[in-house]
Amino acid sequence: MGFARQSGKGFLLCMAIAVPAWIAGKTFPIIGGPVVAILLGMIVTQFIRDKKTYEPGIKFTSKKILQWAVILLGFGLDLNIILETGAQSLPIIVCTIATSLIIAYIMCKAMKMPSNISTLIGVGSSICGGSAVAATAPVIQADDEEVAQAISVIFFYNVLAAMVFPAMGSFIGFDTLSGEAFGIFAGTAVNDTSSVTACASTWDSMWNLGSETLDKAVTVKLTRTLAIIPITLVLAFMRAKKGQQEGQKVSIKKIFPFFILYFIGASCITTAATSLGVSASIFAPVKTLSKFFIVLAMAAIGLNTDIVKLVKTGGKPLMLGACCWIGITVVSLIMQHIMGLW
């Protein structure tokens, strides 16, 4: 009861921001609820004089709710479908993820950026935007301002990709009689689900392909989401090793991302259920709840973010995001060309 009383006020404030942000995200899917929630949170926090009574609830929402969102995300993954249709795109996915992480590492050193920011942007750009940031942030102990900055950068290039890629695809000669090639491109070169959907749907509309491109792009995107598992585990062990080298007493139990195990469990439950003939639509409410939890957590992160500081320090992260985005796009196109898909 004591915890509920302490956290209730901050949690309700996050809810008050998350609900309109969720509605706005549905109305304007190219922007998405998480970004709206962060922006609203950053605005609302400017008008709160004493945040002490809200802090326990805000902290709970930005940390625990974020982890629950990732766990519930697993219920949207049928591993059978991913294995059947994702194998074709797997070499491209591996190469684009490697490209983004290498670029993030090199630019972090070259521009002397905080490692947490570069890690979040590199992982978010290469895997699945906000979901990857949500999974990675607790593992590397990123603070709320770092998360907000990474989400903002990824959002900017998401919107750019959704607007530019369909026209670019037509210009460089993607097959307009089938949505397969552009679907793979959208699924590997655009990171957030909302922008992947917008980009692929635009291509379908342009060439009257029904939902062919969209179906392909979403499947590829879901395959990319599985990369959350090895990435977070590697980051956890790297952090443990660094701590030991610095003479710190590191507890594997404390730093191990156990919520990723629950994410894997949720994926296995979905796979087993659909294999037994259960309709995948039964998991739709859980998937929706996962998306809402991400919006809710982003509202809390916005409340803990100094918008002035964010703007002042945004130059380097934007440059890093641009390099990751361009690198992923170029590598995706090259790999498709090598594999004869385009």
Image: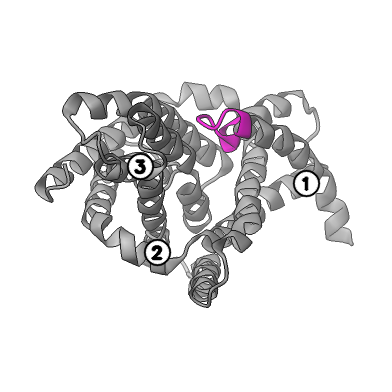
Residue 213, numbered circle: 3
Name the residue rendered at 58%, 42% in the picture: 144
Q: Residue beneath label 2, please?
A: 81
**Residue 160 drawn in magenta:** no
Q: CA distance from mark 1 to mark 2?
A: 37 Å
Residue 247 seen by the camera? no
- Pick the residue in front: 139 or 97: 97
**Observer-nearest residue: 120 or 97?**
97
Compare marks 3 and 1 and give the one earlier in the sequence. Answer: 1
Q: Is residue 139 left or right of residue 330?
A: right
Question: Quarter of the image holding residue 190?
Answer: top left
Q: How is the image coloured?
A: one colour
Mark 1 — residue?
11
* Boundaries of the magenta span: 26-36
Q: Which badge, 3 or 2, comes first in the chain's sequence? A: 2
The residue at the point 57 percent across, 65 percent down is 279
Q: Looking at numbered disc 3 in the image, what kind of residue is underneath it?
A: Thr
Dot 1 crowding, Cα within 10 Å, few <14, some 14–19, many 20+: many
